[in-house]
Image (spheres, rainbow, N blue to C red):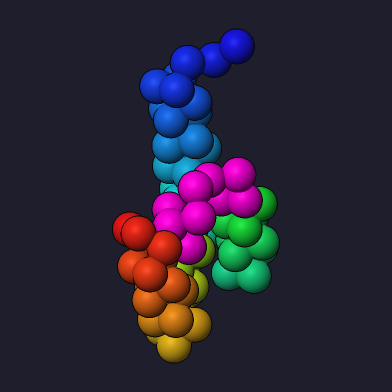
Amino acid sequence: MRHTGDMTAAWEEELAALWETLGSVKDSDFLVRMDAVSAHLPSAIRLFERAAGQDSTGHPLRAAELYREALAAGL
């Protein structure tokens, strides 16, 4: 069984690796992968990461809504 710190490091590494692909993969593929990578994260963090993905791929209105949801979820 992994310790909480190990789990945190694992998802942070997974997200970092995904962010490194931004600009080298299709935006739609990046967003699908972001949804998959963030699916197991706590709600507020998941919403924030999805918002950042939307923001970074040229969808500020979608991002704004997700950022608001992340704040409401306790970010």
- The span picked out in magenta is 38-47
The answer to whether residue 21 is left or right of residue 39 is left
Residue drawn where x is 45% and y is 48% of the image = 20
| Residue 52 can be seen in this image | no
> Closer to the camera, 24 or 60?
60
| Residue 35 picture location, percent across and down | 62, 58
Q: Main secondary structure of the magenta part?
A: helix
Please indicate whether residue 3 sits to the left or right of residue 34 in the image: left
Q: Check residue 40 for magenta coloring.
A: yes
Up-down relation of residue 11 to residue 43 (above or below): above
Q: Position of residue 16 (x, y in %)?
A: 43, 42
Above or below residue 21? Residue 2 is above
Placement of 6 over or under 72, stated as above or below: above
Please tell me which residue is depicted at 49% across the width and 48% down the height of the picture: 42
Q: At x 60% / y 11%, what residue is drawn?
A: 1
Residue 13 coordinates in the image, percent (x, y)? 45, 33
